[in-house]
Protein backbone atom coordinates (compact mmCIF):
# COMPACT_ATOMS: atom_id res chain seq x y z
CA UNK A 1 0.00 0.00 0.00
CA UNK A 2 3.00 2.33 0.47
CA UNK A 3 4.89 3.91 -2.45
CA UNK A 4 8.03 2.00 -3.33
CA UNK A 5 10.11 5.18 -3.39
CA UNK A 6 9.80 5.51 0.40
CA UNK A 7 12.05 2.46 0.80
CA UNK A 8 14.89 3.73 -1.40
CA UNK A 9 18.14 3.61 0.62
CA UNK A 10 20.34 6.67 1.00
CA UNK A 11 22.98 5.31 -1.38
CA UNK A 12 20.44 5.03 -4.20
CA UNK A 13 18.90 8.49 -3.96
CA UNK A 14 18.81 10.06 -7.41
CA UNK A 15 19.93 6.93 -9.25
CA UNK A 16 18.19 6.65 -12.60
CA UNK A 17 17.38 10.38 -12.62
CA UNK A 18 19.29 13.33 -14.09
CA UNK A 19 19.49 14.98 -10.65
CA UNK A 20 22.79 14.81 -8.80
CA UNK A 21 22.24 14.04 -5.11
CA UNK A 22 24.77 15.04 -2.46
CA UNK A 23 24.58 13.83 1.15
CA UNK A 24 26.29 16.01 3.75
CA UNK A 25 26.24 16.01 7.54
CA UNK A 26 23.93 18.01 9.74
CA UNK A 27 21.97 21.24 9.40
CA UNK A 28 25.06 23.37 10.04
CA UNK A 29 26.96 21.57 7.28
CA UNK A 30 24.22 22.38 4.79
CA UNK A 31 24.25 26.02 5.85
CA UNK A 32 27.99 26.25 5.25
CA UNK A 33 27.67 24.47 1.92
CA UNK A 34 24.88 26.76 0.73
CA UNK A 35 26.85 29.87 1.74
CA UNK A 36 29.86 28.50 -0.14
CA UNK A 37 27.77 27.74 -3.24
CA UNK A 38 26.36 31.28 -3.27
CA UNK A 39 29.83 32.73 -2.84
CA UNK A 40 31.12 30.61 -5.71
CA UNK A 41 28.41 32.00 -7.99
CA UNK A 42 29.38 35.53 -6.98
CA UNK A 43 33.06 34.88 -7.68
CA UNK A 44 32.43 33.14 -11.01
CA UNK A 45 30.30 36.03 -12.24
CA UNK A 46 32.95 38.54 -11.14
CA UNK A 47 35.57 36.58 -13.06
CA UNK A 48 33.33 36.95 -16.12
CA UNK A 49 33.20 40.71 -15.59
CA UNK A 50 29.65 41.03 -14.32
CA UNK A 51 27.48 40.76 -11.22
CA UNK A 52 25.71 37.50 -10.43
CA UNK A 53 21.92 37.19 -10.50
CA UNK A 54 20.61 34.68 -7.97
CA UNK A 55 17.19 33.52 -6.82
CA UNK A 56 17.48 32.77 -3.10
CA UNK A 57 15.27 31.52 -0.28
CA UNK A 58 15.01 32.70 3.28
CA UNK A 59 15.00 29.09 4.50
CA UNK A 60 17.25 27.26 5.20
CA UNK A 61 18.30 30.23 7.29
CA UNK A 62 21.85 29.45 8.39
CA UNK A 63 23.59 30.53 5.18
CA UNK A 64 23.12 34.29 5.19
CA UNK A 65 25.16 35.27 8.27
CA UNK A 66 27.91 32.95 6.98
CA UNK A 67 27.81 34.53 3.54
CA UNK A 68 27.95 38.01 5.08
CA UNK A 69 31.05 37.02 7.06
CA UNK A 70 32.71 35.71 3.92
CA UNK A 71 31.93 38.85 1.91
CA UNK A 72 33.26 41.10 4.65
CA UNK A 73 36.39 39.09 5.44
CA UNK A 74 37.39 38.66 1.79
CA UNK A 75 36.32 42.18 0.79
CA UNK A 76 34.09 40.92 -2.01
CA UNK A 77 32.51 43.77 -3.91
CA UNK A 78 28.85 42.75 -4.26
CA UNK A 79 27.41 46.06 -5.38
CA UNK A 80 26.43 44.55 -8.74
CA UNK A 81 25.08 41.33 -7.22
CA UNK A 82 21.30 40.95 -7.61
CA UNK A 83 19.51 38.77 -5.08
CA UNK A 84 15.92 37.91 -5.95
CA UNK A 85 14.21 36.46 -2.92
CA UNK A 86 11.77 33.72 -3.81
CA UNK A 87 8.73 34.86 -1.93
CA UNK A 88 7.10 36.93 0.78
CA UNK A 89 4.07 36.63 2.99
CA UNK A 90 1.19 39.01 2.29
CA UNK A 91 -1.58 40.61 4.30
CA UNK A 92 -5.18 39.63 3.59
CA UNK A 93 -5.42 42.53 1.12
CA UNK A 94 -2.36 41.29 -0.81
CA UNK A 95 0.23 43.76 0.42
CA UNK A 96 3.66 42.86 1.74
CA UNK A 97 3.76 42.22 5.46
CA UNK A 98 5.47 45.23 7.05
CA UNK A 99 9.22 44.68 7.20
CA UNK A 100 9.09 44.92 11.00
CA UNK A 101 6.57 42.05 11.21
CA UNK A 102 8.19 39.00 12.91
CA UNK A 103 7.39 36.81 9.89
CA UNK A 104 8.49 39.22 7.17
CA UNK A 105 11.09 37.69 4.87
CA UNK A 106 12.20 41.20 3.89
CA UNK A 107 12.81 42.00 7.54
CA UNK A 108 14.73 38.77 7.95
CA UNK A 109 17.06 39.56 5.05
CA UNK A 110 17.70 43.04 6.40
CA UNK A 111 18.52 41.77 9.90
CA UNK A 112 20.58 38.69 9.13
CA UNK A 113 22.25 39.66 5.88
CA UNK A 114 22.14 43.17 4.46
CA UNK A 115 22.70 44.95 7.77
CA UNK A 116 25.64 42.62 8.50
CA UNK A 117 27.53 43.69 5.38
CA UNK A 118 30.04 46.47 5.06
CA UNK A 119 27.99 49.11 3.20
CA UNK A 120 30.84 49.57 0.74
CA UNK A 121 30.48 45.93 -0.31
CA UNK A 122 26.72 45.35 -0.06
CA UNK A 123 24.38 44.93 -3.03
CA UNK A 124 22.82 48.23 -4.02
CA UNK A 125 19.35 48.76 -2.54
CA UNK A 126 17.73 48.35 -5.95
CA UNK A 127 19.46 44.97 -6.25
CA UNK A 128 17.75 43.60 -3.11
CA UNK A 129 14.64 42.29 -4.80
CA UNK A 130 11.43 40.65 -3.65
CA UNK A 131 8.46 39.75 -5.84
CA UNK A 132 6.02 42.65 -5.68
CA UNK A 133 2.31 41.83 -5.44
CA UNK A 134 1.58 45.20 -7.08
CA UNK A 135 3.87 44.47 -10.07
CA UNK A 136 4.33 40.73 -10.56
CA UNK A 137 5.84 41.38 -13.98
CA UNK A 138 8.86 43.16 -12.49
CA UNK A 139 10.82 39.97 -11.75
CA UNK A 140 10.59 38.56 -15.31
CA UNK A 141 11.57 41.95 -16.73
CA UNK A 142 14.54 42.21 -14.37
CA UNK A 143 15.70 38.70 -15.23
CA UNK A 144 15.55 39.51 -18.93
CA UNK A 145 17.54 42.70 -18.37
CA UNK A 146 20.19 40.76 -16.44
CA UNK A 147 20.56 38.11 -19.14
CA UNK A 148 19.00 35.34 -17.05
CA UNK A 149 19.49 33.85 -13.59
CA UNK A 150 22.82 32.21 -12.79
CA UNK A 151 21.44 29.93 -10.09
CA UNK A 152 18.21 29.33 -8.24
CA UNK A 153 18.68 28.12 -4.68
CA UNK A 154 15.82 26.78 -2.58
CA UNK A 155 14.28 24.05 -0.50
CA UNK A 156 11.37 21.64 -0.83
CA UNK A 157 8.12 22.10 1.06
CA UNK A 158 6.12 19.39 2.80
CA UNK A 159 3.87 19.16 -0.27
CA UNK A 160 6.75 19.38 -2.71
CA UNK A 161 6.54 23.09 -3.39
CA UNK A 162 9.51 25.14 -4.59
CA UNK A 163 9.30 28.74 -3.36
CA UNK A 164 5.55 29.10 -2.75
CA UNK A 165 4.61 27.35 -5.98
CA UNK A 166 1.90 25.26 -4.35
CA UNK A 167 0.61 22.08 -6.02
CA UNK A 168 -2.95 22.12 -7.39
CA UNK A 169 -5.69 21.35 -4.90
CA UNK A 170 -7.07 17.82 -4.86
CA UNK A 171 -9.31 17.22 -7.84
CA UNK A 172 -7.62 19.92 -9.93
CA UNK A 173 -5.41 18.69 -12.79
CA UNK A 174 -2.64 20.83 -14.25
CA UNK A 175 -0.25 19.48 -16.87
CA UNK A 176 3.47 19.46 -16.18
CA UNK A 177 4.00 21.86 -19.09
CA UNK A 178 1.43 24.34 -17.79
CA UNK A 179 2.74 24.13 -14.23
CA UNK A 180 6.33 24.65 -15.36
CA UNK A 181 5.22 27.81 -17.16
CA UNK A 182 3.59 29.42 -14.10
CA UNK A 183 5.03 32.94 -13.65
CA UNK A 184 5.62 35.13 -10.62
CA UNK A 185 2.21 35.62 -9.01
CA UNK A 186 0.07 36.11 -5.90
CA UNK A 187 -1.63 33.03 -4.47
CA UNK A 188 -3.22 31.43 -1.43
CA UNK A 189 -1.07 29.11 0.66
CA UNK A 190 -2.21 25.55 1.17
CA UNK A 191 -3.18 24.25 4.58
CA UNK A 192 -0.17 21.90 4.49
CA UNK A 193 2.28 24.76 3.97
CA UNK A 194 0.73 26.92 6.65
CA UNK A 195 0.72 24.01 9.10
CA UNK A 196 4.38 23.02 8.63
CA UNK A 197 5.46 26.69 8.67
CA UNK A 198 3.67 27.17 11.98
CA UNK A 199 6.20 24.79 13.56
CA UNK A 200 8.76 27.62 13.41
CA UNK A 201 6.50 29.79 15.59
CA UNK A 202 5.60 27.24 18.23
CA UNK A 203 2.81 25.58 16.26
CA UNK A 204 0.47 28.57 16.24
CA UNK A 205 -1.27 28.17 12.88
CA UNK A 206 -3.37 31.30 13.33
CA UNK A 207 -0.36 33.62 12.92
CA UNK A 208 0.72 32.20 9.57
CA UNK A 209 -0.53 34.39 6.70
CA UNK A 210 -2.91 32.87 4.17
CA UNK A 211 -1.58 34.77 1.16
CA UNK A 212 1.84 35.11 -0.44
CA UNK A 213 3.65 36.29 -3.55
CA UNK A 214 6.12 33.93 -5.18
CA UNK A 215 8.63 33.77 -7.97
CA UNK A 216 7.14 31.38 -10.53
CA UNK A 217 8.18 27.92 -11.60
CA UNK A 218 9.08 29.51 -14.92
CA UNK A 219 11.70 31.69 -13.27
CA UNK A 220 13.05 28.92 -11.01
CA UNK A 221 13.33 26.34 -13.77
CA UNK A 222 14.72 28.95 -16.16
CA UNK A 223 17.85 29.47 -14.03
CA UNK A 224 21.04 28.06 -15.49
CA UNK A 225 21.62 26.04 -12.33
CA UNK A 226 19.04 24.68 -9.86
CA UNK A 227 20.37 23.95 -6.38
CA UNK A 228 17.90 22.59 -3.80
CA UNK A 229 18.65 21.81 -0.15
CA UNK A 230 16.79 19.67 2.41
CA UNK A 231 17.80 19.95 6.07
CA UNK A 232 14.61 19.03 7.96
CA UNK A 233 13.92 15.45 9.14
CA UNK A 234 10.40 15.53 7.66
CA UNK A 235 11.88 16.07 4.17
CA UNK A 236 13.04 12.45 3.93
CA UNK A 237 9.78 11.35 2.31
CA UNK A 238 9.14 14.36 0.08
CA UNK A 239 12.72 14.27 -1.24
CA UNK A 240 12.15 10.68 -2.32
CA UNK A 241 8.82 11.57 -3.87
CA UNK A 242 10.42 14.41 -5.83
CA UNK A 243 13.29 12.23 -7.02
CA UNK A 244 11.57 8.91 -7.63
CA UNK A 245 7.83 9.46 -7.75
CA UNK A 246 6.03 10.64 -10.88
CA UNK A 247 7.00 13.97 -12.45
CA UNK A 248 3.81 15.87 -11.77
CA UNK A 249 2.41 19.24 -10.74
CA UNK A 250 1.14 17.46 -7.63
CA UNK A 251 4.79 17.47 -6.46
CA UNK A 252 6.34 20.66 -7.89
CA UNK A 253 9.88 19.69 -6.87
CA UNK A 254 9.65 16.64 -9.14
CA UNK A 255 10.03 19.07 -12.05
CA UNK A 256 13.70 19.48 -11.08
CA UNK A 257 14.16 16.25 -13.04
CA UNK A 258 13.40 18.26 -16.19
CA UNK A 259 16.18 20.77 -15.48
CA UNK A 260 19.52 20.32 -17.31
CA UNK A 261 21.65 21.11 -14.24
CA UNK A 262 19.87 20.25 -10.99
CA UNK A 263 21.54 19.23 -7.73
CA UNK A 264 19.77 18.19 -4.52
CA UNK A 265 21.82 18.38 -1.32
CA UNK A 266 20.42 16.68 1.78
CA UNK A 267 21.48 16.20 5.37
CA UNK A 268 22.50 12.65 6.28
CA UNK A 269 19.33 12.12 8.34
CA UNK A 270 17.18 13.28 5.39
CA UNK A 271 18.94 10.74 3.19
CA UNK A 272 17.72 7.90 5.41
CA UNK A 273 14.37 6.30 4.52
CA UNK A 274 11.52 7.60 6.66
CA UNK A 275 10.51 5.49 9.65
CA UNK A 276 6.90 4.63 8.85
CA UNK A 277 6.20 2.47 11.91
CA UNK A 278 4.00 3.72 14.71
CA UNK A 279 6.09 4.35 17.77
Image (tube, rainbow, N blue to C red):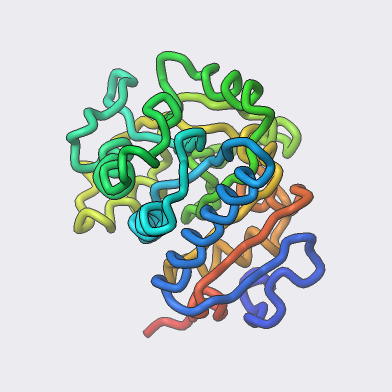
Question: Does residue 24 sit above or below 185 in this rendering?
Answer: below
In-image side of 78 versus 256 (left or right): left
- Nearest the viewer among 33 and 69 is 69
Rendering quarter of residue 126 = top left
**Residue 35 in view, yes or no:** yes
* Residue lying farthest to the right in this orientation: 16
Residue plotted at (49% across, 79% down): 25
Question: Does residue 8 sit above or below 224 in this rendering?
Answer: below
Rendering quarter of residue 73 = bottom left
Residue plotted at (22% across, 28% down): 98
In-image side of 276 versus 15 (left or right): left
In-image side of 177 versus 164 (left or right): right
Question: Does residue 224 sit above or below 265 in this rendering?
Answer: above
Residue plotted at (58% across, 40% down): 52
- Nearest the viewer among 151 and 181 is 151
Residue 88 in picture, x, y percent from top left: 37, 34
* Residue lying farthest to the top in this orientation: 134
Rendering quarter of residue 137 = top right
**Residue 276 in view, yes or no:** no
Question: Does residue 6 sit above or below 175 in this rendering?
Answer: below
In the picture, the quarter occupied by the N terminus is bottom right
Residue 117 in picture, x, y percent from top left: 32, 46
Amino acid sequence: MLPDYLNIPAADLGKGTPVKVRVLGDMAALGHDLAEAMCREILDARAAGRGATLIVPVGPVEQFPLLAQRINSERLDCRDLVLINMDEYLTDDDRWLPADHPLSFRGFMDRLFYSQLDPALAPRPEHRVFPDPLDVGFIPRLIAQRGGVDACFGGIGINGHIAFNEPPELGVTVSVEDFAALPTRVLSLTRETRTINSVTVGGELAVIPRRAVTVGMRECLGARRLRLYCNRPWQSAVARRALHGPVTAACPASLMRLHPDAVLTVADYVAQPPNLRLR
